[in-house]
Amino acid sequence: MYIGDPVIGKMIEVRYDRYRNDGERDRDRAFIEQFNTSYVSWWPEGRAALTGKQRQERNLFLESDISAEGCRPHVVYTVCGLNLQAMQAEWFNIRNKPNAHYQMLRKSCSTVVLRVLKAGGALNKLSAAKRAWFSNNLYVTPKNVAQICNELRDAGLATKAKSQNCPEKGSFMFGLR
């Protein structure tokens, strides 16, 4: 997820195309993070375990997430009308926490994105009933984040673009497609 204008984020990615492999990027990771501060990504180090904490290893670019997922995103939302400064501050708190970790049900990519959206006031844009529903999930899935973004779209605060690889409705398990 990009905080702010995704076009600017893409321009930063193009600037770092000179890195031919992940090894080069890893060596310059601290330098890159100074400039690409608006890309939210939260991955486990290695494969995700169903239980327990793991060290986190976030990707720095959308193309790195696409490579890790093995495909392009099914749906892309462009959200507007949220407090970008609050979102940025929440993301800095999350990513700069010492010994930050990944945990499948409590601190995954979906929960991190939801925390950043909440900080920007996304849930305040929903009705009280929907705000209560999304605030009290036992665990958060990408589908839950998409549902919130759909509500923001319906309120005129987001646009939605489906990709060709988006699965049909009904082909999901536990909220995951």
Image: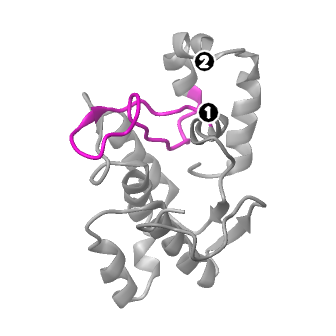
Q: Residues within 10 Å of mark 1 (few under 14, many from 20)?
A: some
Q: State which region is magenta.
A: 35-61
Residue located 42% across and 30% down the image: 57
Element on which disc 2 rests? helix
x, y percent for residue 157: 61, 75
Could you tell me which secondary element the residue under label 1 belongs to? Answer: helix
The residue nearer to you, when weighing 101 against 5, is 101
Please state which of residues 96 and 109 is positioned toward the viewer in this rendering. 109
Camera-side residue: 89 or 160? 160
Q: Quadrant of the C terminus?
A: bottom right
Q: Give the label on residue 168, or none.
A: none
CA gap between label 1 and label 2 equals 9 Å
Question: Can you say whether 63 is above or below 121 in the image?
Answer: above
- Amino acid marked by disc 1: Ser
Q: Position of residue 19 (x, y in %)?
A: 70, 16
Choose top left, top right, bottom left or bottom right for residue 118.
Answer: bottom left
The residue indicated by pointer 2 is 22
Q: Earlier in the sequence, mark 1 or mark 2?
A: 2
**Whole-percent x and y of residue 12?**
70, 32
Q: How many marks?
A: 2
Q: Which residue is mark 1?
A: 64
Give the residue displayed 26% in from the left and 74% down from the top: 136
Task: Please say whether residue 82 is one of the residues in the magenta stretch.
Answer: no
- Residue 153 x/y as whole percent: 62, 77
Give, as a three-letter code, the residue at label 2: Asp
* Picture layout, residue 40 above or below residue 168: above
- Residues under numbered marks 1 and 2 in contact, where contact means CB atoms less than 8 Å apart: yes
As for residue 52 lying within the magenta part, the answer is yes
Q: Main secondary structure of the magenta part?
A: loop
Nearer to the camera, 84 or 3? 3
